[in-house]
Image (cartoon, rainbow, N blue to C red):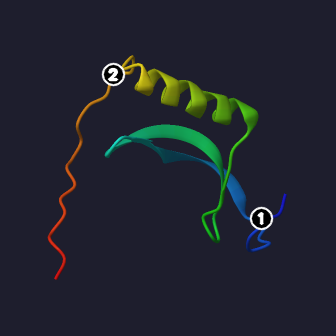
């Protein structure tokens, strides 16, 4: 398999943190997906996409246990 972005063949399975937005919050979901080690392009199979959709639905229903791992702050425009 070659990367569709950079044409590298250096693609491996890696654990990444997928971001799912929930209103103004972001939930990080660890997932194992194919990643181009040259440019970082990610490749999701059907199983991974179904998992993301399932977690997004559970998040909307408030049926997903999450933990706070940090905070994001915004400074006023200069």
Q: What SS does tag 1 mark?
A: loop
Task: Look at the picture and state if 29 lies above or below 66.
Answer: below
**Alpha carbons under labels 2 and 1: distance apart:** 35 Å
Mark 1: give few (<14), some (14-19) or many (20+) Cα within 10 Å: some
Q: At 60% from the left edge and 64% from the top edge, which residue is drawn?
A: 40
Tell me the number on the disc at residue 36: none
To which residue does mark 1 refer? 3
Residue that numbered label 2 is attached to: 65
The residue located at (79%, 66%) in the rendering is 4
- The picture places residue 57, in percent across and down from the top left corner, at 51, 24
Front residue of 76/30: it is 76
Eyeballing the image, is 77 above or below 58? below
Looking at the picture, tell me which residue is in the foreground, 12 or 54.
54
Image quadrant where one finds the C terminus: bottom left
In the image, 67: left or right of 75? Answer: right
- The answer to whether residue 73 is left or right of residue 43 is left
* 24 up-or-down from 36: above or below: above
Query: Mark 2 vs mark 1: which is more N-terminal?
Result: 1
As drawn, which residue projects farthest toward the right? 1
Query: Is the N terminus in the top left, top right, bottom left or bottom right quadrant?
Result: bottom right
Expressed as whole percent of the image width and height from the top left, the position of residue 6 reads: 74, 74
Q: Provide residue 23's location: percent of width, then percent of height.
A: 35, 41
- Secondary element at tag 2: loop
Residue at 74% across / 34% down in the picture?
46
């Amino acid at each position: 398999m070659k990367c569709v972005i950079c044409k590298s063949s250096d693609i491996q399975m890696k654990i990444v943190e997928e971001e799912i937005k929930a209103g103004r919050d972001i939930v990080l979901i660890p997932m194992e997906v194919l990643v181009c080690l040259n440019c970082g392009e990610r490749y999701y199979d059907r199983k991974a996409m179904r998992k993301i959709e399932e977690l997004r639905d559970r998040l909307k229903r408030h049926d997903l246990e999450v933990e706070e791992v940090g905070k994001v702050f915004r400074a006023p425009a200069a």
